[in-house]
Image (cartoon, rainbow, N blue to C red):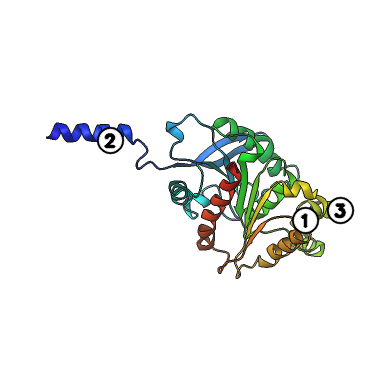
Amino acid sequence: MKKTIVLFVVCFSLIFPAVGQTGKVYDNLSMTSKILKSERKYAVYLPPDYDTSQRSYPVLYLLHGAGDDQTGWVQFGEVLRITDNAIADGTATPMIIVMPDANTGKRGYFNQGDDWRYEDFFFEELMPYVETQYRIKKEKRYRAVAGLSMGGGGTFMYALHHPELFSSACPLSAYIGPLTIDDFKERLERGNMNLAEEEVNAYFKRHNAIELLKTVSVDDIKSVNWYIDCGDDDFLYEGNSLVHMAMRKKEIPHEYRVRQGGHTWTYWRESLPEVLSFISDTFHQH
């Protein structure tokens, strides 16, 4: 009888190897950056069938907010549990999720002088590195970007600066940049940063979502599928609303969601399943 039970278990495991499989998260990986002159940490989520398949996967670059690092979406966002569940119930396709650290050294996803060229690092070093290190599809159609707060701002900027690279962009509770040039100048004064008027204007136009909507080709913006989400009690609600209205005026298709909630992980954990479903629809053939 015992031999029969053992044989049944072995046969069952051979026929149904995927039962009980979960994805894997590695949250303390690193790569060498010549641009930032340092070791840069990142985390990665690998889908449940990654080790047992030979296929390549679409990729989501998932950006953290100010004060967090590459572990934010892992520890507080519960990316492993939420993504495993979404893949298991069919609302998300298996994908690789890359979560870089933009909080060590200086903070932020944009270039700030010669000593913090983070945006250059992201596109010239991080993306090429992870897309050869892992079995990632390299076409625009299979690449998405999302993030919260500061990472939501990074999502807006990266997709607007490089619409040729991303099929979907999902900014959550995003900091869209200073709402006016005067706001930006006041922020620079508080930080004791002295820039020439020309530099101030150029930086503002390149790092403000509303300004970029005025200058980037509408067709390029439309080539990205947009999902914008911000809580009704969020202190960044105004900026997200203004982006929504600016897109409406230019007839740029986008999903705009306002739910009850504030600038909290409770809100973003509820957003993540919707983001995974949204970008999966773009990854799929229709």
**Taking 169 as reference, is 143 above or below it?**
above
Which mark is nearer the camera, 1 or 2? 2
Q: Nearer the viewer, residue 284 or 20?
A: 284
Identify the residue at image location x=62%, y=45%: 144
Is any atom of residue 36 visible in this view?
no
Residues at badges 3 and 1 in contact (C-beta under 8 Å)? no
Identify the residue at image location x=78%, y=57%: 250
Rounded to the nearest whole Å, what is the CA distance between mark 1 and mark 2? 65 Å
* Position of residue 148 measured from the top left corner of the image (x, y, whole percent): 60, 56
Identify the residue at image location x=66%, y=66%: 237
Is any atom of residue 253 visible in this view?
yes
Circle 3: element type: loop
Q: Nearer the viewer, residue 275 or 188?
A: 275
- Local crowd at mark 3 within 10 Å, few (<14), some, or many (≥20)? few
**Amino acid tagged 3:** Ala
Residue 193 marker: 1
Rounded to the nearest whole Å, what is the CA distance between mark 3 and mark 1? 10 Å
Where residue 286 sits, quadrant-wise, is: top right
Question: Is residue 212 found left or right of 153 in the rendered image?
Answer: right
Q: Which residue is mark 3?
A: 196
Which residue is at the far left? Answer: 1
Q: Nearer the viewer, residue 242 or 208?
A: 242
Which mark is nearer the camera, 3 or 2? 2
**Amino acid tagged 1:** Met
**Amino acid tagged 2:** Phe
Identify the residue at image location x=67%, y=43%: 166
Residue 272 marker: none
* Position of residue 153 measured from the top left corner of the image (x, y, whole percent): 67, 54
* Position of residue 234 measured from the top left corner of the image (x, y, whole percent): 61, 67
The earlier-in-sequence mark between 1 and 2 is 2
Q: Which residue is mark 2?
A: 12
